[in-house]
Amino acid sequence: MPRSTKAKPTAPATAANPAGRREHASFPPVVIAEIQRAAREGIYDIRGLGAKRRLPSFDDLIFLGASISRYPLEGYREKCATNVTIGARFAKKPIELKIPITIAGMSFGSLSANAKEALGRAASEMGTSTTTGDGGMTQEERRASKILVYQVLPSRYGHDPDHMRSCEAIEVVVGQGAKPGGGGMLLGLKVTERVAGMRTLPVGIDQRSACRHPDWTGPDDLEIKIAELREVTDWEKPIYVKVGATRVKYDVALAVKAGADAVVVDGMQGGTGATQDVFIEHVGIPTLPAVRQAAEALQELDMHRKVQLIVSGGIRNGADVAKALALGADAVSIGTAALMALNCNAPLFLEDYAKLGTAPGYCHHCQTGRCPVGVTTQDPELEARLDPELAAHRVRNYLATMVLEAQTLARACGKSHLHNLEPEDLAALTIEAAAMAKVPLAGTDWIPGRGGA
Amino acid sequence: MIEVDVESLGVRALNERLHRLPRDTNERLWKITNPKGAHALAAGLDRPLSIEIEGHVGYYCGGMNKQAEITINGHAGPGLAENIMSGVVRVKGNASQSAAASGRGGLVVIGGDASSRCGISMKGVDIVVGGSVGHMSAFMAQAGHLVVCGNAGAHLGDSIYEAVIYVGGEVESLGSDCIEKPMTDEHRSKLEQLLASAGLRVQAARFRRFGSARQLYNFKVDHAAQY
């Protein structure tokens, strides 16, 4: 008797899979869809934001609050300070931030002018800094930002010594967490007349920016480059070096050796305006191990707290801030989360999300320039949906909330400054996080890779 | 003329002195001696000064220059006049790699040869090279002119945008999306003007013009091998 060719149910019936069909572990529907998209279009997928896959993260750590062995701070009257000074190593004019949360570099072009202005206003109200991006400085962001960090990028789009001299600090961008080893992209839809003019490019082209600086390669050149930037700005400005998290220990040590005042380490959760999905998901290490490696590199050189460590990549709340600081960061930087406070992925203008084939909560279509909420667009009609004043207020509230949350955790650990948090205040919930953050698995004395029981 | 010995004064003190000159300064003529390969010499200037440097300079001489006219009576290291905005930077000898990188305006004249990546990412600067240039020159060149009186190394003008290249000698090979284009009267007169401003007596007639085929301006799968 011939065998039936009809499939039998092999998996539990669920709402998404009512017939109980067996999903292929290597080829689930999402993988099949991507193969067929590639077969149809013949080019990689380009998108915005950072890695979407599940990664070991700060969520896998918990704080060990004070109890009998150590006592907490009284939240109502005992101060928990949050200020941070950046650049005292070499700069004549170090910058003083009131909070250890800064706004990361995002280009005008990728972001609308209203978005840049709103971020600047919010940062200024909170006493922190914002950062230019790949595409040069706009007057809107200069006016809105009391403390503006000027990026020197491989593309040098719109690079202007007057702009650099007008800023409070300089950031030499070597890489970013979303794409360490990759250059920028801005698809033609966003290369409007103003954006093209600032970058000296034809309007409407798919713009690819360089992944290497045009006038230096390697750590010895970087040292000479930093010296030139100091000469041009008369040694006034703090100079940061930003790297995407990969070989963090070496990169941080080399940045210090090259004369950086501060090192910015961006983990793979860090966002982008437009990059190949394969790059975002498969290059770089998560922020969690990156912080600890960076802090250790500084400690080995006796440069911890002398060269400031700024960590970014997937920072979302005060707990993430406190954990990054406990692992050794002097400050954190936010990009994606700040855009979300502006309204990125907010449930507004649903029909425009639908036109992009997406929905609030899932949108990563920054590269299209059709941002439904006016954040990552150059379209005047869409941009008008973002009121810079109201948006600035939201970002300010969000920053204030994160600071309060971080202070709450620090006080619970008995710390009078966020910088007094330390790895000994933490334990890990997973073996992976314990190994990466080098803190014990909760309830044990075990740090994987550290020997002992 | 004000004469400064870099060896005794130091680069930092010299640059600071040049940066602090008032806008309407009368101290316009400078002679700098004993540079001995110092880096970032006369970088970040923004005054209409005329500066002669007697000897060889290191990296980034005249970097980000505005207004000043700097003449180097010697050779120059990497990144000569990088990101120049305006003014003129001349080197009588050779220039190392990445000369005039990302330059946005002004004129850079190299009397001898330039090494690789001359005019990389140039954004409006005019560069005139009396001798030859190395490989990957005018890589990702966005705007401005690169004039090479001698020969050009491999992959000239790779991924070029709207910059224009004139070469008097041989071209080893062209980079992706860079093609030869016809020399019209308009181009010849522009070339003559550039040669004249560089003070070079070279016949414009033998030069060929190169620029972008504009085939890589928008992503197309058919061009994947060129990216």
Image (spheres, coloured by chain):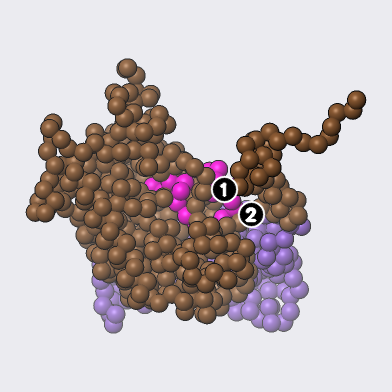
Magenta stretch holds residue B52: no
Mark 1 to mark 2 CA distance (whole Å): 10 Å
Instruction: Identify the secondary structure beneath mark 1.
Output: helix
Shown in purple, the chain is B
Q: Colour of chain A?
A: brown
Which residue type carries mark 2? Asp
Query: In which quadrant will I find the C terminus of chain A?
Result: top left
Q: Badge 2: few (under 14), some or many (20 or more) residues near its Cα, within 10 Å? A: some
Q: Is residue A444 left or right of residue A360?
A: left
Query: In which quadrant will I find the N terminus of chain A?
Result: top right
Which residue type carries mark 1? Phe
Q: Which mark is residue A433?
A: none
Specify the farthest residue to the front: A1
Q: Which residue is mark 1?
A: A279
Number of numbered markers: 2
Q: Nearer the viewer, residue A11 or A140?
A: A11
Q: Which residues are magenta?
A: A263-284
Q: Nearer the viewer, residue A325 or B107?
A: A325
Specify the farthest residue to the left: A77
Q: Chain of mark 2?
A: A
Q: Which residue is mark 2?
A: A45
The percent coordinates of residue A119 (x first, y second) are: 36, 68
Give me the residue at 45% from left, 51% from top. Answer: A270
